[in-house]
Image (cartoon, helix red, strand yellow):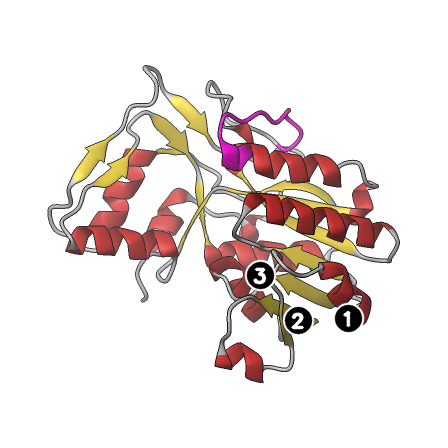
Amino acid sequence: MKKILIIGASGFIGNALYKELNSYFDTYGTYRTDNSFFEKNQKFFQYDMETEDISILLDNLKPTIIIAALRGNFNSQIDAHLRIIKWITNHKCKLFFISSANVFDSFSNYPSYEYDKTLSDSVFGRFKIKIENALMRLPPHKYVIARVPMVFGATSPRVQELKTLHDLKAPIEVFPNVIINVTTILKFTQQIHYIINRNKKGIFHLGSTDLIYHFDLIKEVCDMLQLEDPVFKQVYDSNNDRYLAVLPRDNKLPKNLQITTQQVIDSVIIK
């Protein structure tokens, strides 16, 4: 049986992955801050990337798949990932790196596909690119790069933030000329499960098959959540339409693992 270690399993994405995979694989996770729930769970290990060397845990656990879902200081994340990459080079192990559509945020005239050149104007995007480039120096069977757009779902931080801003009558920032795609936490975890099961490799774009303007998306999500009279702050970061969308071309998943924007909007309420 595959032994999976999710680094950052106490976060929103990491914990959702743990719940999806735990019943099917020998799955472990890390958490950072003191938490009685995780402390009691024998499959969770406390790990602070700013003070500890991840290699020690890897040597002891010997996972066959590592899923990196870390958050926090970018320099510490880069150091942790470089240590993981060095470790998997010498062991029978594959790294799944959760990347972002922001690795393409310098390109604005069209959606981006898996093997397009990455280029970013943002600190976040450049940080993701640095780790991607380090991974792509490895043989392809050693890694999966999963580029993900905005993630929604009834319990997602993005939905919680919209509710909080609405309750505070605070403005919700929207970008009327930015064209994006999106996904749900449920579909994302199912896609990662499939990629593990089928022993896939390389780069995957895990967003909705269709595109939408950011402003239209947020308006429709607010309607679905029945948030009355939300206050929108329209932000124009360019004069023309700008794409920030990751679409699959080379590594397409089966139809049942694809998702539409409407399905993402529908996902924000618990039915």
Extreme residue in the bottom direction: 40
Q: Where is residue 186 in the image (x, y as percent from the top left)?
A: 48, 59
| Contact, mark 2 vs mark 1 (Cβ under 8 Å) | yes
- The amino acid marked with disc number 3 is Gly
Q: Which of marks 2 and 1 is nearer the N terminus?
A: 2
Relative to 25, say whether 222 is above or below.
above
User: Which quarter of the figure is the N terminus placed in?
Assistant: bottom right
Q: Which of marks 1 and 3 is nearer the N terminus?
A: 3
Q: Residues within 10 Å of mark 2 (few under 14, many from 20)?
A: many
Q: Please say whether residue 116 is one of the residues in the magenta stretch.
A: yes
Residue 1 appearing in the image: no
Relative to 155, say whether 121 is above or below.
above
Residue drawn at (51%, 33%), measured in percent from left and top?
Answer: 123
Q: In which quarter of the image is residue 41?
A: bottom right
| Contact, mark 3 vs mark 2 (Cβ under 8 Å) | no
Mark 2 element type: strand
Which dot, 3 or 2, sits closer to the camera? 3
User: Which quarter of the figure is the C terminus placed in?
Assistant: bottom left
User: What segment carries the magenta color?
Assistant: 114-125
The mark found on residue 61 in the picture is 1
